[in-house]
Image: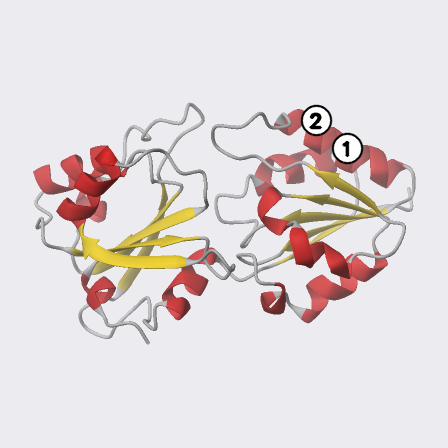
Amino acid sequence: MSGFVSFVGSGPGDPELLTLKAVDRLKRADAVLYDDLSAGPILDHAAPGADLVSVGKRAGRASPKQDHVSRLLVDYARQGGRVVRLKSGDGGIFGRLEEELVAVHAEAVPFEIIPGIPSACAAAAAAGMPLTRRLTARRLQFVTGHDVTGKLPEELNMAALADARATTVVYMGRRTFAGLAELLLAHGLAPDTPAMIAVGVSTPEQSLARSTVADLAQRLRSEPPDRAPTLILYGALAEMSDA
């Protein structure tokens, strides 16, 4: 088998945040299987004539099944193709990278992993804030806001998530944050803990809004669902002023 798969993190959406290695692999690819958030100008770096295949998964929309995506990767590689699996942000952070690694391992397909800028880092940069601070925010934690059913995951480590001395980033949590906030307050997190919601980070549609955990939960209870990619950050650092 002469095919090869490059799992490439495309960052949060701004093509200028692609790494040099990511651009190189796109330019040499025979096929690019891309997430929705990796579409648009990022694909302008793909080689002319490359197969561009949308395999993105978005909440509330019909999406390809994971086994279908994995099979496409293997099939293209079996044909001797140089395949780029383009994942938004960093594929190793809530990007379902492991399922696809299992598939290529099982078929002995050679591969590499090229990291991308995580959307949490891009959101903090856009807000002019760090994610950690000496003495008062020594710990950084990422958590997903929904499980495979779209609901708030069970068996969350609430003691850790309610730690006001950590910076917590909730991925894909817009629909479930109100419920999470109730649990956080029940486990001792102060209602006025600073929070920030970041939508469409690094894209022309980017918006950042600061609030508190309690107020943000109330706002999201009353707002209609929004399918735009959303991060929620909370902890002391979320109160910093915009840059």
User: Quarter holding the C terminus?
Assistant: bottom left
The residue at which mark 2 appears reads as 68
At which x and y percent is residue 134? 24, 75
Q: Which of 27 and 1 is in front in this view?
A: 27
At which x and y percent is residue 70? 70, 32
Q: What residue type is labelled 1?
A: Leu
Q: Which quadrant holds residue 196?
A: bottom left
Q: How crowded is mark 2: few (under 14 residues within 10 Å), some or many (20 or more)?
A: few
Q: What residue type is labelled 2?
A: His
User: Quarter holding the N terminus?
Assistant: top right
Q: In this view, does 115 lie above or below 142?
A: below
Q: Tag 2's secondary structure?
A: helix
Q: Tag 1's secondary structure?
A: helix
Left or right of residue 121: residue 180: left
Q: Are the residues tagged 2 and 1 within 8 Å (C-beta)?
A: yes
Q: Which residue is drawn at 38% across and 33% down?
A: 146
At which x and y percent is residue 237? 23, 66
At which x and y percent is residue 73? 76, 37
Q: Is residue 110 above or below residue 164?
A: above
The residue at which mark 1 appears reads as 72
